Each structure stands twice: as structure tokens, then as C-alpha cells.
Image (cartoon, rainbow, N blue to C red):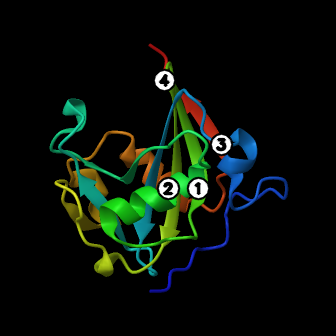
Amino acid sequence: MSTTARPNPFNTGNIGERSADLVFGPAKKTKMYVVGFLFDKKLERVLLIRKNKPQWQKGLLNGVGGKAEEGETYSQAMTRKFKEEAGLWIHTWLSFHMLKFDAGAVIFYWATGDVDSAKSLTDEKLEIHLISELNSLPVIPNLRWLIPMCMDNQYEYGTSEILV
């Protein structure tokens, strides 16, 4: 199984492919999560997961991911979580955004690869959807801007913060 990634559209020369690892280092004791979007090579379809938990995500689509373990880099966590949930080793994840909240943060990744080879390995079902239909799907609300953001060639790595 071979996967490829587009050139990093937000590479400014000082933040490379593994920018989240370079900027934030290994996971610490705060709650650090990773979420990845695997696109087909034509960038027309994306692999999403139908969430059962946590309760606020139940029934909605999200990217594949989960909690980073203490001491592992975020790209290692992304690779591990994708293998555990979708059965594929993807080593070309590119980080593109971090969403901060009170207790931690979520690092978002994307890559291209063989979305059709992914297999649901948990009780949460994997689904392939056309990106053009994203606005009509029951998704976690931030997917409506995160997916277009990672495909935007003008976007540079950034952060946003949830204010309560």
C-alpha cells in the first residue's frame, strides 16, 4: 500500500512536514488529540468516521483520530490511531491546524492515499464521502471549515482557540 501527500501548501520554510511535532514536541499530560483526514489522490473524496462516542459527537462524522499518548509525537499518534481504527499505515501525514481548548488541544492532519482500502476496526464505521457533498452531511461542525482549510494552497499552519 502506497500513499502520497501533496506538497505542504503552508510550508513557510521554517515549519516542515511534521510542523506540529517541531512546534509542540511530544505529548504531555494535558489532553492532546489528533484527527486526520485521508483524501483520495484526486482530492475528491475523504474518509470519515461515524462517531458513537463521546456523546456530543454521537451519530456525526469526524476525521479519524484520538488521544496522543504521553511521550509520543503527534505524528506518531496520528499514524498509530489511523492504523488502529482504519487498518492502514499512513506515514505522510501533514499537520495543518491546532484547535486549543481549556484542557488541551487537537492537532489536525491530512494525507492522500487509498481510501478504498480502509477497514473499520472499531465499533465506529468508516465512510467515504465526496468533498463536494460536505455541507449536506451530518458532520462535526468544524469539519465544514477544517476540510476546505487543509486543501487551501494559500493557508499557512495556524491555531484557533475555543473560548468559553
* Residue that appears at 26% across and 66% down: 129
Name the N-terminal-most of marks 1 and 4: 1
Residue toward you, 124 or 130 = 124
The x, y position of residue 10, in whole percent, is 70, 57
Which of discs 1 and 3 lies nearer the camera? The answer is: 3
Which of discs 3 and 2 lies nearer the camera? The answer is: 3
- The answer to whether mark 3 and mark 2 are in CB contact below 8 A is no
Q: Whole-Å distance between the Cαs marked 2 and 1?
A: 5 Å
- Residue, far front: 71
Q: Which residue is mark 1?
A: 75
Mark 2 residue type:
Met
* Residue that appears at 17% across and 39% down: 58
Name the N-terminal-most of marks 4 and 3: 3
Q: Say which quadrant the C terminus sits in.
A: top left
Q: Which residue is mark 3?
A: 26
- The answer to whether mark 4 and mark 2 are in CB contact below 8 A is no
Q: Which residue is mark 2?
A: 78
Q: Which residue is mark 4?
A: 162
